Image (cartoon, rainbow, N blue to C red):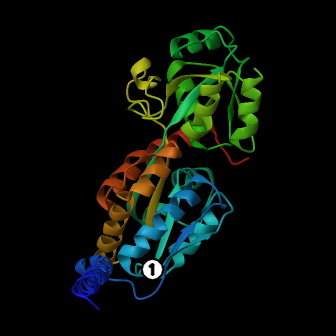
Amino acid sequence: MGRGGAQRRDEGRMINRRTLLAGLAVPAMGRAQGWAPTHSIRMLVPYGPGGGADTTARLLAGPMGAVLGQNVVVENRQGAGASIGAAEVARSAPDGHTLMMDAMAHLVTPAMMRLPLDYAAAFAPLSLVTELPHVLLVPNTSPATDLAGLLAHLRGKPGEVAFGTSGNGTAGHLASVILARRAGLQVLNAPYRGIGPALQDLIAGRLGFVFATVASAMPLVRAGTARGIAVSSLARVPAAPEIGTVAEQGFPGFEMNEWNGLFLPAGTPAPAMAALAAAVRHAVADATVQARIAAMGAVLVGGDPAAFGAYLAARRPVIAELVRAEGITPE
């Protein structure tokens, strides 16, 4: 073999060595935090397959597993307002090998149902992964072109107009109730089994308005079958920057988003939490994850345990009071 062949062989060895070292460096993140998993990690989702929490969990599982050096296996345990899966996680050993990807129901279900589990004490918040703002939709036949117009329309028909939701206690339901309370509206709640049927009735003009996630709402807005007049987040959303927030249209501080976040059983050691939080940060920095999350109409957060704990602490009493005052119960 000539000199050129030997040089290519040496370069190949160098590339393979760099690849191996890079691969070894990834799992080292966990060890650098003082903890590393000894076997596969369960990421339990207390909802059915295909929903926002499930999709987000599966997007994070691969990058997190790569950085931790163990597979992260997503399992679905739906039922009873997500309390079945939550109870299973709460009973799990607090050793860093069990995670839960939960959502708004983490705050709503304990407020609506009597449960043998104190959510605030049973779980350690790890990271707020995403927020999912909602778009306030009206039919394209509605006289309203902005929030003020919708409120004027509804005030002219007290107790006659219904809003649609994908079920009691959902973010869209709570956003509708909060808006009605703050604006002094008399409107009717029409809960559906899923957002699809609600949006069909909105398009048909049988509902006055619906709060729907960006992913569900914007195809209708783009197609001209519904009109988006506000978003439920504090800031405008990248997927629909032309639509103003409820807050900027006369209701300062208005915010009601669905969210997905990771939890651990209470008592998980700090080194395990630190390593897992670092793995989440690695996952949310992944370009593929970011693109898929943006396509869902979600806003990637990836905050640390302290920030997520503060986020929950600020919202838990507000949700509980709203559920109690409005008499919101499971369907």
Image point 60% across, 26% down: which residue? 221
Q: Is residue 122 visible?
A: no
Q: Is residue 230 in view?
A: yes
Residue 70: image quadrant is bottom left
Q: Position of residue 308 (x, y in %)?
A: 36, 55
In the depicted structure, whether residue 19 falls above or below residue 304 = below
Helix, strand or loop for disc 1: loop
Q: Position of residue 170 (x, y in %)?
A: 60, 44
> Viewed as shown, does residue 148 lie left or right of 173?
left
- Who's the residue at 53% across and 78% down the image? 91
Q: Residue furthest front?
A: 2
Q: Residue at x 25, y 88 (%)?
A: 2
Numbered-mark total: 1
Between 121 and 93, which is closer to the camera in this rendering?
A: 93
Residue 46 placement, left or right of 277: right
Rendered location of residue 159, percent (x, y) = 71, 18
Quadrant housing residue 160: top right
Mark 1 — residue?
97
Quadrant of the image containing the N terminus? bottom left
The percent position of residue 306, horizontal first and vertical second, equals 29, 58
Q: Which amino acid, by three-letter code, is at mark 1?
A: His
In the rendered view, tell whether residue 76 sits above or below residue 185. below
Residue shown at the point (48%, 68%) measured from the top left: 61
